């Protein structure tokens, strides 16, 4: 987890096996000084971390990414993006949690993820 959170959750709705989050980016976060100074973008690793932390928080379980079957970064996410929508659909198993997630800016899909998380 970052010392200075990159994302602020504005709303979170959870139903059975679905989590929907609206969030905003901290445009002043220090990470943008190095990624990239002249044209800052949200790092892909931070998007993955957001999925993990959101799922772990919603399930109240420490998790780690065990396998990422399919990760697609489809559009850059700029810090000035007014808000983002994170959708996570998950299927809990006995030893793991299968996840399909997407991160969107307005109607533009920025990232898609199919992954398996396990208890940390």
Image (tube, helix red, strand yellow):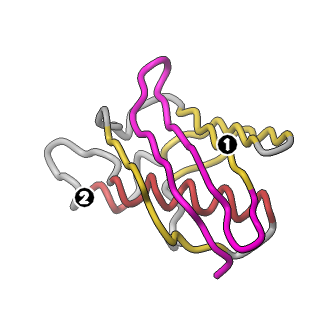
Image quarter (top left, top right, bottom left or bottom right) of the C terminus: bottom right
Q: From this viewpoint, which residue is outermost toward the left?
A: 38
Is 53 in front, or is 80?
Answer: 53
| Callout 1 secondary element | strand
Residue 83: in magenta span: no
Q: From this viewpoint, which residue is outermost toward the bottom?
A: 120
Which residue was labeled with disc 1?
Answer: 89
Q: Is residue 51 left or right of residue 16?
A: left
Q: Where is residue 77 drawn, in percent x and y?
A: 35, 37
Q: From this viewpoint, which residue is outermost toward the right?
A: 16
Please tell me whether residue 103 is drawn above or below residue 7 in the rendered image: above
Q: Residue at x 67, y 39 (%)?
A: 21
Q: Where is residue 93 drawn, in percent x and y?
A: 75, 63
Q: Where is residue 27 drawn, in percent x and y?
A: 41, 45
Which residue was labeled with disc 2?
Answer: 33
Q: Earlier in the sequence, mark 2 or mark 1?
A: 2
Q: Residue at x 33, y 61 (%)?
A: 31
Range covered by the magenta-colored residues? 92-120
Please tell me whether residue 79 is drawn above or below residue 99 in the rendered image: above
Q: Residue at x 39, y 34 (%)?
A: 110
Residue 113: in magenta span: yes
- Disc 2/disc 1 C-alpha distance (Å): 33 Å
Q: Residue at x 70, y 37 (%)?
A: 20
Overall secondary structure of the magenta section: strand
Determine contact: label 2, label 1, CB under 8 Å. Answer: no
| Callout 2 secondary element | helix
Image quarter (top left, top right, bottom left or bottom right) of the N terminus: bottom right
User: Residue 54, labelled with which disc?
Assistant: none
């Amino acid at each position: 987890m970052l010392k200075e959170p990159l994302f602020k959750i504005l709303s979170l709705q959870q139903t059975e096996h679905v989590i929907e989050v609206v969030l905003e980016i901290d445009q002043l976060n220090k990470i943008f000084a190095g990624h990239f100074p002249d044209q800052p973008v949200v790092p892909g690793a931070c998007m993955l971390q957001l999925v993990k932390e959101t799922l772990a928080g919603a399930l109240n379980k420490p998790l780690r990414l065990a396998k990422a079957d399919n990760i697609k970064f489809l559009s850059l996410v700029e810090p000035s993006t007014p808000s983002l929508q994170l959708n996570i659909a998950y299927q809990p198993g006995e030893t793991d949690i299968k996840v399909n997630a997407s991160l969107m800016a307005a109607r533009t899909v920025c990232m898609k993820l199919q992954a398996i998380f396990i208890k940390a």
